[in-house]
Amino acid sequence: MGMMDTLKKSLTGEEADQADSDILDTLKQEHRDVAEMLEKLVESTSAAERKSLLNSIKNALVPHLRAEEKVVYDAVLALRGKDQHIHGEEGYLEHGLGDKMLAQLGGMKDAMSAEFSAGAKVLKELVEHHVEEEEKNIWSDIEDNFSDQDRIAMNKKFLAAKKRVRIPA
Ligand SMILES: [Fe+2]
Ligand SMILES: [Fe+2]
């Protein structure tokens, strides 16, 4: 077996394990990864590193947001409870603020400017706040209303939906 075949095989194996996870475990890991990158972005003292981190954050965050809306929020909204409805709508609104902040940061020429530093801090705080509420409210809605099997199925849908997301330039 050639090196590429070995690589392909191990990647497929990893993807298969990941697909059998609970959706909430996948989301938790992605939240951690983005939090770590945002921390680095705020602390970075190099323009090139900031640009590259912003790009990595966008590539990770945008598919997460879109797939989460489709697979998780829409499932919570479909429960038709009053609280669940508010949780879903709040999630959509906060995702929209995240998109806006990402676009604004992407348009800033000088990554070492005070404006960029402030924007990076705002994005980090926004995401932290959002994740905290999401892991409390949306996750209780999921835990209370969906079986282990449902959540594995949601995870598969989430991973597939992420692959179809187009990331804005
Ligand atoms: Fe999330
Ligand atoms: Fe979210």
Image: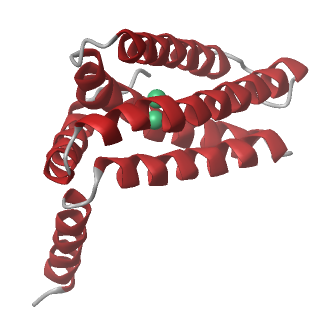
Which of the 4 image quarters holds residue 107? top right
Above or below for 123 versus 3:
above
Residue 149 shown left or right of residue 116 in the figure: left
Residue found 41% across the figure and 21% down from its top:
168
Residue 58 shown left or right of residue 139 in the figure: right
Residue furthest to the bottom in view is 1
Task: Answer whether residue 134 is visible to the viewer in this image.
Answer: yes
Task: Answer whether residue 58 is visible to the viewer in this image.
Answer: no
Quick one: quadrant of the C terminus? top left
Q: Position of residue 148 (x, y in %)?
A: 20, 53
User: Which residue is more in the foreground, 98 or 58?
Assistant: 98
Residue found 15% across the figure and 44% down from its top:
150
Q: Position of residue 82 (x, y in %)?
A: 37, 9
Above or below for 31 versus 13:
above
Residue 57 shown left or right of residue 69 in the figure: right
Q: Position of residue 72 (x, y in %)?
A: 30, 30
Q: Position of residue 152 (x, y in %)?
A: 19, 52
Residue found 56% across the figure and 20% down from its top:
98
Q: How is the image coloured?
A: secondary structure
Question: How many badges with numbers are in the image?
Answer: 0
Quick one: quadrant of the N terminus? bottom left
Residue found 72% across the figure and 20% down from its top:
109
Above or below for 147 versus 68:
below
Residue furthest to the right in view is 114
Residue furthest to the left in view is 1
Above or below for 125 versus 90:
below
Residue 108 shown left or right of residue 89 in the figure: right
